[in-house]
Image (spheres, rainbow, N blue to C red):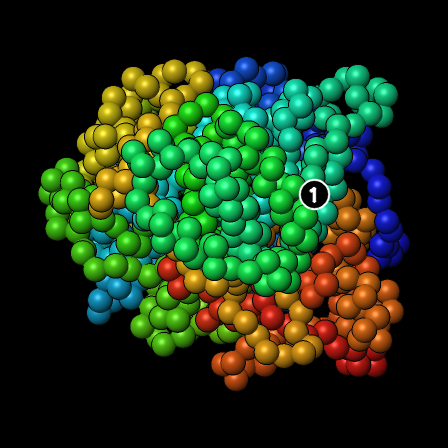
Amino acid sequence: MTEKKNKIQKTEQPGGGWGAARATLKVLMEQSGLSKGSKALLSMNQPGGFKCPSCAFPDPVCRSKFEFCENGAKALAFEATKKRVTREFFAANTVSSLMEESDHWLEMQGRLTEPMRYSEELDKYVPCDWDEAFDLIGGHLRALGNPNQAEFYTSGRTSNEAAFLYSIFAREFGTNNFPDCSNMCHEPTSRGLPPSIGVGKGTVVMEDFDSTQAIFVIGQNTGTNSPRMMANLIRARKRGVPVIVVNPMPERALIRFTNPKDVVQMATLGSTEIASNFVQVRIGGDLAMLKGMMKVIFERDANGEQIIDWAFVERHTVGITALQEDVLSQNWDEITDISGISEEQIRRVSEVYIRSKATMICYGMGLTQHQKGSHLLQQVANLLLLLGNFGKPGAGIAPIRGHSNVQGDRTVGIDEQPSQAYLEQLKKVFHFEPPREHGHHTIKAVEAMEKGTAKVFIGMGGNFVRAIPDTQRSYDAMRKLSLTVGIATKLNRGHLVHGKDALILPVIARSEKIGTSAGEQFLTTEDSMSKVSASRGVLEPASQYLKSEVEIVCRMAMATLPNSVVNWGSFITNYNLIREKISEVYPEIYSDFLSKIRIPEGFYLDVPARRLVWNTPNGKANFLTFDGLNSDDPVHDPDMLRLATVRSNDQFNTTIYSNSDRYRGIYNTRMVLFMNAEDRAERELENGSCVAVETIFSDGMHRRVNGLTVVDYSLPRGAVAGYYPELNPLLPLGYYDKISGTPAAKSIPVRVLIDQETKKS
């Protein structure tokens, strides 16, 4: 086989377009076959079909027959792949040998086909039947000295029904330990926004894109992480709506984009300019920029321009005086120095915001993954509240979440800090006493593994060990466990970094049919704008030995809780019974669930802040102040650069579809470090130099990644970027937002050095 050579080349092509079309066709042909893949694609995100297994961006109000994007097509193609991981595969490969393979190689092996159990003697996974697997899980859990020695992890791909039952199972068992993928990305939304606006969700819906007068996209790479949103941005730009993009890296699709569904654009090689104004903020400079914008507003309003919506502020809010004092105390030299943006540009984008009568602020992990991420989002809410940008068409706050049901899982109970009101309702519906003390989020779960106080880890989907920080430290912690359980569709690193006992349990995928003795069942998901929709698989399961998430959860509960007060067996066959219980536990938002879910387009859950109802202790929206201008703690080291970990356009979360990144001109490698050319020259490096990166952190641990190729890229001074999860070893476990527990992966303090070790080898 000819070895592919690494290639780095400058690209000026717009996002989307023929590149996306070719990539979609290629992956369908390679993985699932054109006929099978096309059939499934035409059912994805359609009434009567299944929800995309990729991102959580909502379906449009008026759907086309092609409601999918490049990354959604890839996610489906790899899910519907013809390739299989069989018992013969495991017989031929030790776990130690599989650990040497790349994440992409593991993904490419195909679908898991039957339950497997780790044999320490052979260092291999060997077949086991389902009864044996559930007996092993139940035995380990019942043997624990304390229910809090178990960790129940959930991936954002898990359905509402499975997540709900999973939360009931763990709480009847006796713990609130729910480390969740949300902990690692949008937890600042869940924890930071409720004190401000009374809800940890966004307040916009899809229709708002059609009436908004300005859109801010801050810290979110739309073209890679939620490509279907590009259609909304294109429509907005075509009707003259300004789109302000704030990001340290100029992302190709947010500069210009060709819609693959636009026949004229495709035929003429045309494109749409997306960003009307690109604001290249420094890493960690968003807080200074936001306060700069508010400073402009307060100053101009004080001079008689009547900019602030005082009627809204006086009726709906508390705390504007303290905010005004904080913002006006900031001086422009510090604002521009920390943000990396000139006063002139801040005033220019502020003018766009002031002129708009309805503004949406969309954001991603570029805001949430900082040490003060929760406080940072509160400043976003402050900015919107000043001009009354809640409770009216085209306005509001819009967290653009990642995985397809990460918000839904949170809504139906996957929460390590449940409210007492919820626990009381749970007790009323299910007739058991749930645990009251808060449980573990991701960071606390890993710390418990390190201490030996966590013994069992059950992963409902996902790739926990590759998503979490401090890779080697986390690997060592996971290997101390007595039992690890991976419930998954595909092989991943999490199955290879395991406890003394380990199980791989293969699950029916989102795109596949679920049949029970009561007939074919469907699932539900909640998108990032709080719409709940039905999801019905159309493909046959990849193997006759697969089980649904719901059945696996119920069978684990039955094996663990022989005297359970919950009728787990009934839920296995009839998913409407699960939805009835969801309605009972959440009567305010899920009332009449069974009727509403029959609506083909789905239904919106109530978000009180959208109705200008503030579920805060004082019944008002709160302007919340935060001292200073930094979203991360200062580091006093002259060599320090801030590292942001990013995703390529050919990956989704930890799933690597290829080792290339078409939008950034990187081919056949992921071991690169994007650098500002002046920062690179200052360190006497060449474009293409081989470097190592070391973390600057005060816990005494040495963190270093070798073998990175320097790539000159348009970044602000002091910023570098590289791929996740390859650079996760540089992210300390203790470097996170203390309110939410979210790792600060977008601002890791590092130094860059010549890599002498790799050069010698």
Percent coordinates x, y for residue 222 in the rendering: 63, 39
Percent coordinates x, y for residue 544 in the rendering: 48, 36
Image quadrant in which you'd find residue 748: bottom right
Left or right, 678 with reference to 41: right
Q: Nearer the viewer, residue 467 or 578?
A: 467
Q: Nearer the viewer, residue 393 or 179?
A: 393
Q: Residue at x 70, y 43 (%)?
A: 278
Amino acid, disc 1: Phe
Q: Residue at x 53, y 39 (%)?
A: 362
Residue at the far front: name it. Answer: 303
Q: Is residue 653 visible?
A: no
Up the image or down, 729 lies above or below 605; here it is: below
Image quadrant in which you'd find residue 417: bottom left
Q: Residues within 10 Å of mark 1 (few under 14, many from 20)?
A: many
Q: Residue at x 80, y 52 (%)?
A: 666
Q: Is residue 612 visible?
A: yes
Percent coordinates x, y for residue 18 in the rendering: 80, 30
Q: Nearer the viewer, residue 586 or 500?
A: 586
Q: Secondary structure at mark 1?
A: strand
Percent coordinates x, y for residue 402 in the rendering: 52, 43
Mark 1 lies on residue: 278
Left or right, 654 with reference to 201: right
Q: Residue at x 52, y 32 (%)?
A: 359
Up the image or down, 45 lies above or below 203; here it is: above
Q: How many marks?
A: 1
